[in-house]
Amino acid sequence: MKVILLDGNSFCYRAFYAVRELRNSKGQATNAVYGFITMLEKLIKAFNPDGVALTFDLKGPTFRHKRYDQYKIQRPPMPEDLVSQMPIIKAVVQAMNIPIFEKEGYEADDVMGTIARKLELAGHETFIVTSDKDALQLVNKKIRVLNPQKENFIYDEAAVKNRFGVMPKQVVEIMALMGDAADNIPGVPGIGGKTAGKLISEFGSLEGVLKNISKIKSGRLKANLETYQAQARLSRELAQIDSQVPI
């Protein structure tokens, strides 16, 4: 069985900005609703899945916010015209008999990861539809990530290895070092994706890097790794998807 899991919030934002200034006779914004339905139907037609499910973030802090109060703090609030359309979009999804999964205290990524792992154990194939690179850590022979912002490019194990130079399960190790500006995950100052990829490729994991700081030739890189060890470990914790959500 082939199942598509969609990051509902990401999909809604994409629909909202793809279709502008569309309202009904009462002045209610409908651009995101129209864009969402159009994109969803197109996706289903293109991939012909046996099942589809959506996940959404809920309001309120998650375990990551409690662990690090600066997590995603730089993000602006959802536009009011999109806020007003979210209940309509969810109602349309339910009318299409597509299940919606949400869990207080967790993000949509965690819920998708949990569902994908359950489907994997049952022998099913899952496509996670999201532009969030965090999800790439979930990729394996049964789980792939489909990026709608890159013309539905599909990340399998080979594609992840080609992009980062490491296996999917090591993506979280790279993010521990380079951080993630989109989520305000700090990482280690001065380390970008290329350097992080080289370090993880050589030493296997964040802990492997930290245990071998003495072997690193660059004085500045070595100093930053020594100084920001705790921050790197925190960043790894924030970037790790929890695939054991009680749902």
Image: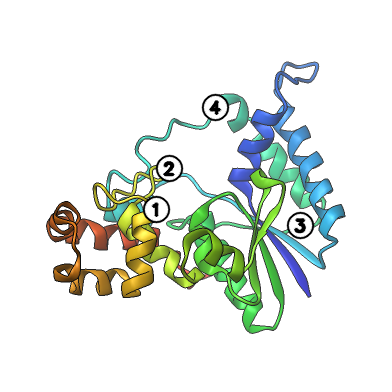
Image quarter of residue 145: bottom right
The amino acid at mark 4 is Pro
Which residue corresponds to mark 1? Answer: 193
Per the rendering, the mark at residue 164 is none
Q: Which residue is drawn at 58% across and 32% down?
A: 83
Secondary structure of the residue carrying tag 3 is loop
| Picture disc at residue 182 | 2
**Residue at the (69%, 30%) spot, across then down:** 18
Q: In this view, does 163 lie above or below 82?
A: below
Q: Return the residue at label 4.
A: 79
Q: Nearer the viewer, mark 1 or mark 4?
A: 1
Which residue is labeled 3 in the image?
Answer: 98
Element marked by disc 1: helix
Q: Which of pointers 3 and 4 lies earlier in the amino acid sequence?
A: 4
Please tell me which of labels 1 and 4 falls first in the chain: 4
Estimate the spatial distance between the alpha carbons at disc 2 and disc 4, rounded to whole Å: 17 Å
Left or right: 175 with respect to 108?
A: left
